[in-house]
Image (cartoon, grey):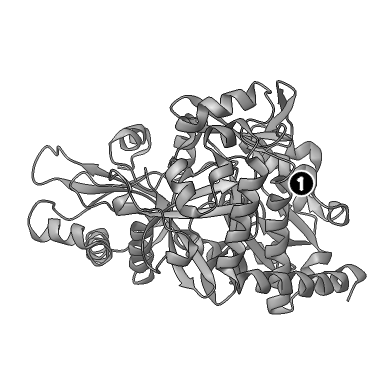
Amino acid sequence: MSIKSFAAKIFAKTVHKKIKKWASNPIETQEKVFQQLINQAKNTAFGKEHNFTAIHTHKDFSEQVPVRDYEALKPYIDRVVAAEADILWPGKPLYFAKTSGTTSGAKYIPLTKASMPTHIEGARNAILNYIAETGENKFVDGKMIFLQGSPVMGSTNGIKTGRLSGIVAHYVPAYLQKNRLPSWETNCIEDWEDKVEAIIKETLPEKMSVISGIPSWVQMYFEKIQQQTNKSISEVFPDFKLFIYGGVNFEPYRAKFNQLIGKTIPSIELYPASEGFFAFQDKQNNPGMLLRLDAGIFYEFIKADEFDTAAPKRYTIGEVEVNVNYVMIISTNAGLWAYNLGDTIMFTSTQPYRILVSGRIKHFTSAFGEHVIAKEVEHALKETIAATNASVNEFSVAPQTNPTSGLPYHEWFIEFDQEPDNMEAFALRLDENMQKQNSYYLDLIQGNILRPLVITKIAPKGFQAYMKSIGKLGGQNKVARLANNRNIADALKPWYKK
């Protein structure tokens, strides 16, 4: 055992003990975070306008601070971006994490001196917790790769600005720098396809032990390695011991990954975002992720089916139930207050509080009132694949409300790595699994409002080409699983497979 792996094991025990302590006292931990946030921000412009000095309870907070998304909070963020101090949080941010996707263009998410360490500790503690749980620590001596955005940063009124993953790259501990790939120069390459080629060139000769990234882009990296070497990933990297991922549900990719790797590799799921590092998988035998209740984030939850009502109830951590679809609302030490992140989650456990990401509140298919969410389509596809010989690279679902003939239907755009022997039987089984997942969908099928789903095949690499065509190839970008219109469906037409 090397000095580094020995030290990691000792450190892991200490961190695991701290995690267990706050996870065992969830309500007290969140109350402490809540009081700290309110107290620290009471003299900011936001705090004064929302009377933070009179907020003592969650009831006070929910009455005085409405739920806002980015657009609603933007007047305050614009002042922060203009370099005004003490607006949402004391002082000015250290960074802006710049992302895209809102109606007004780019989003600028503040990262403060208080919030930045929680992003770093989230990833670190996930790995250390894995070491404490499993006893596996040899991988720390090998090379590690994190497929991420460029660390090159710009400046916005004197505040450094870049992608979150690129900002985090500046905080890699010194003891990991020698083990970490790709090189700084390669990481700075903006074009994703060129970057992957450069990463392959750097990593092929190395003893890779940890590989991390969004599954769809790691898959692209693996496929290119396989094409170049004609070997499985485990043959190319025999020391590969741990896969770390986040951003999307891994289940639709798992069978393909096992095929590319040549065996099953232990994995850790993370739930990071520019707005905060929310959760990580703390048990190998449990797919739920431990919600980080001590990380400068106060959580509220609104039931998804009540979200659009006039005054939906805002639940705290002690009031939530398992298997209920909630919109997650956050208040953070970066100055986001009662902020609608846009994600929906479900609790898989309340002792401790573990979650899974069920989708996006704006990403659903409900042209007929069925409100199908990402978790449901992903599970239905997983069950269908498990019962057939098919393999899927990527997929998306949209409603067809005006077919040229027959009843409306859900259209599934699927890029198969291996097509099923019988496509008709595959589609029928998939539809049956969807009916099991969503009772409203079942009623629509049985009531002859909808006919069974239709599969439209997408050509190999079609989704990659589509993402490139809209300027979202690589990095943190992900294919939307669900849409309530035909925008993605129409944009995919050049890659329909005959």
What residue appears at the point 45 percent right and 70 percent down from the top-left corner? Answer: 348
SS category of the residue bearing label 1: loop
The picture places residue 201, in percent across and down from the top left corner, at 75, 46
The picture places residue 33, in percent across and down from the top left corner, at 62, 56
Camera-side residue of 150 and 417: 150
Q: Farthest residue toward the front?
A: 54
Camera-side residue of 166 and 456: 166
What residue appears at the point 33 percent right and 48 percent down from the top-left corner? Answer: 307
Looking at the picture, which amino acid does disc 1 mark?
A: Pro
Residue 196 visible from this viewpoint? no
Q: Farthest residue toward the right?
A: 3
Going by the image, does 69 lie left or right of 384?
right
The picture places residue 476, in percent across and down from the top left corner, at 57, 43
Question: What residue is pinned by disc 1?
Answer: 182
Quarter of the rendering containing residue 294:
bottom right
Going by the image, does 21 lie left or right of 313?
right
Camera-side residue of 496 and 254: 254
Please tell me whether residue 427 is drawn above or below residue 491 in the rendered image.
Answer: below
What residue appears at the point 87 percent right and 74 percent down from the top-left corner? Answer: 6
Quarter of the rendering containing residue 446:
bottom left
Residue 469 visible from this viewpoint? yes
Please tell me whether residue 391 is drawn above or below residue 119 in the rendered image.
Answer: below
Going by the image, does 85 lie left or right of 284?
right
Quarter that holds the C terminus? top left
Please tell me whether residue 43 is drawn above or below residue 220 in the rendered image.
Answer: above
Q: Residues within 10 Å of mark 1 (few under 14, many from 20)?
A: many
Quarter that holds the N terminus? bottom right
Camera-side residue of 42 and 312: 42
How many numbered markers are drawn? 1
